Image (tube, coloured by chain):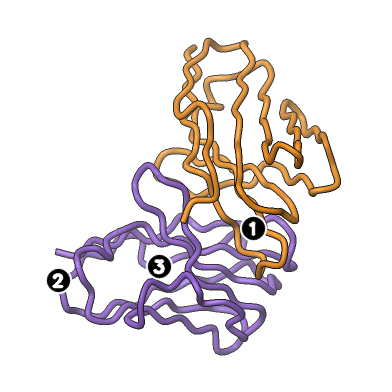
């Protein structure tokens, strides 16, 4: 597509539920990144894929968070047993190569009640 | 964690004036990038400067990089109301997996 697409745009769920956030990168982009952004702050790195391989997951806060990119294109970030502190904007970005500029989607606003 | 600080946190200027934002970072970097974020939207890449470059221009944007001081500046000339946004610097640290480490941003308001 023309840009990075994330869905849903908004997700409201009760504490304890699992959520899955989807990212569809720009066609042909090799690298895909997940970030989390709190209000008034810059995004913080969560995890990164090169093709289908998860290269770095050092930013994932704990083992309730996981991500996959099974065919090297669309990626899913899953949060299990959600907690209120997981509420944030979750952003996905893709880049053509590993060192180039990253193109961001509009994000998924996650609210945990 | 945040890589560094942007200065100022907020800046308000009149249309037509120049806006300068500064960014400091902590580690050795591969490159530094500037992004713009309009309210509620995604981040838009503005410009990338590599660690062996000192200055770069793109339209009304001028970026400088001083690796000895671990700092960068973004100058927007002849500002427009449409430039109103948050501006973030982000670094790719040497030896990292290419993820961006962002600063906390500068909120720029350009008054018509």
Which numbered disc flags the more N-terminal residue, 3 or 2? 3
Residue drawn at (28%, 65%), measured in percent from left and top? A86
Which numbered disc flags the more N-terminal residue, 2 or 1? 2
Query: Which residue lies under the disc numbered 3?
Result: A7
Q: Secondary structure at mark 3?
A: strand
Q: Which numbered marker is on residue B48?
A: none
Query: Which residue lies under the disc numbered 1?
Result: A102
Q: Are marks 3 and 2 in contact (CB under 8 Å)?
A: no
Chain hosting mark 2: A
Which numbered disc flags the more N-terminal residue, 3 or 1? 3
Q: Looking at the image, is mark 3 or mark 2 nearer the viewer?
A: 2
Q: Looking at the image, is mark 3 or mark 1 nearer the viewer?
A: 1
Query: Which residue lies under the disc numbered 2?
Result: A14
Q: Secondary structure at mark 2?
A: loop
Residue drawn at (53%, 35%), measured in percent from left and top? B6
For residue A81, which quarter of the picture? Answer: bottom left
- Report the side of A14 relative to B31 (left or right): left
């Amino acid at each position: 597509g023309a840009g990075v697409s994330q869905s849903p745009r908004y997700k409201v769920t009760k504490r304890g539920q699992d959520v899955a956030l989807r990212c569809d990168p720009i066609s042909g982009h090799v690298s895909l990144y997940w970030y989390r952004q709190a209000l008034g702050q810059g995004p913080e790195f969560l995890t990164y894929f090169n093709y289908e391989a998860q290269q770095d997951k050092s930013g994932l806060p704990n083992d309730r968070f996981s991500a996959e990119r099974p065919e090297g294109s669309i990626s899913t970030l899953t949060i299990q047993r959600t907690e209120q502190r997981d509420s944030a904007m979750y952003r996905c970005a893709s880049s053509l190569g590993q060192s180039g500029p990253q193109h961001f989607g509009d994000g998924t606003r996650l609210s945990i009640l | 964690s945040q890589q560094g600080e942007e200065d100022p946190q907020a800046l308000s200027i009149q249309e037509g004036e120049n806006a300068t934002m500064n960014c400091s970072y902590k580690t050795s970097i591969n490159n530094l990038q500037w992004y713009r974020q309009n309210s509620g939207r995604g981040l838009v890449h503005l410009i990338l400067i590599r660690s062996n470059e000192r200055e770069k221009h793109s339209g009304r944007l001028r970026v400088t990089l001083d690796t000895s001081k671990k700092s960068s500046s973004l100058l927007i000339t002849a500002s427009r109301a449409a430039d109103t946004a948050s501006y973030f610097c982000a670094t790719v640290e040497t030896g990292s997996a290419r993820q961006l480490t962002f600063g906390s941003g500068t909120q720029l308001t350009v008054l018509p």
